[in-house]
Image (cartoon, rainbow, N blue to C red):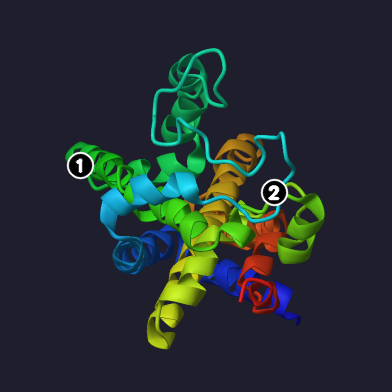
Amino acid sequence: MTEQTQFPTVCCFSVILGGLAAVIYTDALQTLIMLIGAVTLMVFSFVEVGGLEGLQTKYFDAIPSTRKENSSCGLPREDAFHIFRDPVNSDLPWPGVLVGMTIPSLWYWCTDQVIVQRSLAAKNLSHAKGGSLMTSYLKILPLFMMVMPGMISRILFPDLVACADAEICRKICGNPSGCSDIAYPKLVIELLPVGLRGLMMSVMIAALMSSLTSIFNSASTIFTMDLWKHFRPRCSEWELMIVGRGLGWRPYGYKRSQSEYCKPSNWKRMA
């Protein structure tokens, strides 16, 4: 078994053996780990850049040393700190954010089985409502724990994170379009001491594991309840459980490529 398949296999077997209960309990623990790790990196990042004021001041000076003249490529956007941007000339017009993003957001948070299965598994309606409210409050945190640290990474490593030349970007991260994807891992590698780097690595693995186990479980649930029960309406609860857990391995290939993210070889180019 290669390192590309070991991690998804572990996630798959945890779902098969433990079912939704295993998914929910591990997600609760991993959420705590992710919050601790992300807040830790956020604090280190803001200290390094001089706080929020330093971020707002230095961000617009984070320009790569090599860039094409007479081009805006590599220059920070003037509206970088604006949530509601110009409706005509910006990259994210505010009408599109409010109207366009509302539809996929409603689909994901209100109808996607990966998310809805948590509410359906709640003990009662009050627990389901409370969990949804808690999640909505947690969704405020990524602005401070992920977006702003990413901007700080551009300040600290402008020639890497904000590279504006296709060939240079290809050498740095393998993507000629840009290397913004390495912003967060670069902070982890450069700012955190060795022990905390391990914590953040566990945070990223926890996030990946949460995604994988949720997809495995929800996919098997959809097959069992919507298809198997339709063709065998008189099947017993025991049969449904066996089929659901037996089908837990089927979505395995759907997310297997994400295990590449955990390979140490992919982190070497960011060191």
On the question of residue 98 being in view, the answer is yes
For the point 39% across and 36% down, the residue is 81
Alpha carbon distance from label 1 to label 2: 45 Å
Q: Nearer the viewer, residue 68 or 73?
A: 68
Residue located beneath label 1 in the image = 130
Q: Nearer the viewer, mark 1 or mark 2?
A: 2
Nearer to us in this view, 159 or 26:
159
User: Residue 164's mark?
Assistant: 2
Q: Is residue 250 above or below residue 4?
A: above
Tell which circle, 1 or 2, labels the residue nearer the N-terminal end: 1
Q: Position of residue 82 (x, y in %)?
A: 39, 30
Q: How many marks?
A: 2
Give the residue drawn at x 64%, y 38%: 227
**Residue situated furthest front in the rendering:** 69
Above or below residue 10? Residue 210 is: above
Badge 1 crowding class, 10 Å Cα cut-off, few under 14, some 14 to 19, many 20 or more, is few
Q: Is residue 150 left or right of residue 141?
A: right
**Tag 2 secondary structure:** loop
- Quadrant, the N terminus: bottom right
